Image (tube, grey):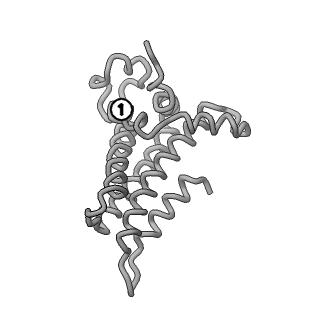
Amino acid sequence: MALADELLFHAEKLIKVSEDSLPSQADLRRSVSASYYSVFHLLLSEGADLLLKNPEIEAVRELAQRSVTHSQMKNVCMYLAKPYQGLPEKLRRFAPEPNPAEIMLIAKSFGNLQALRLKADYQIKWEITNNVAQDAVYDAKEVFSNWQLLKTSRPEAALRFVSILLFFDRYQN
């Protein structure tokens, strides 16, 4: 099982309600964090797979995956959550036209999950609810299914999307 899948499974497991107990604040916070990281690792791993046709070269895959920061992905996703016409001119050159709904949903969910993860990890006085954690898991699952749909229905758009995630922040022209 890939790390992204394991993290999503873990996020779900942490919010399970049993007959004798509710999830603790720590469980709920870790579930939100695992939901975010499942999406982060899904996009990086899938991006490396699409761009590097030989997945046996593990060192090169790791280099590609480790070259992206959370803030870089958040910044790019902030743009890609919009229709093509709303993208900055510099980005339009690389983005698929029109910007598929799957990309906009993935990008928007990534930004929302990252903000929620930061809140869960650092705002200690915030009482997280089971509903918030369940919504985070649901959003992550939506990203997974929209990614699969994008990859199969619009492979060129999927390739452009991951290329933008991995490289756009370094593009200087």
**Percent coordinates x, y for residue 167 in the rendering:** 50, 26
The N terminus - image quarter? bottom right
Residue drawn at (38%, 24%) of the image: 97
Left/right placement of residue 81 relative to residue 160 reads: left
The residue drawn where x is 60% and y is 31% is 51
Looking at the rendering, which quadrant does residue 133 occupy? bottom left
Q: Which residue is mark 1?
A: 80
Q: Amino acid at mark 1?
A: Leu
- Of all residues, the one furthest to the bottom in this rendering is 20
Q: Identify whether 79 is placed above or below 135.
A: above
Q: Is residue 163 left or right of residue 49?
A: left
In this orientation, which residue lies closer to the viewer: 24 or 43? 24
x and y, in percent, of residue 69 in the image: 47, 37
- In the rendered image, residue 109, in percent from the top left (x then y), is placed at 35, 46
Identity of the residue drawn at 42% across and 48% down: 143
Quarter of the figure with the C terminus = top left
Total numbered circles: 1
Circle 1: element type: helix
Of residues 17 and 159, the one nearer the viewer is: 17
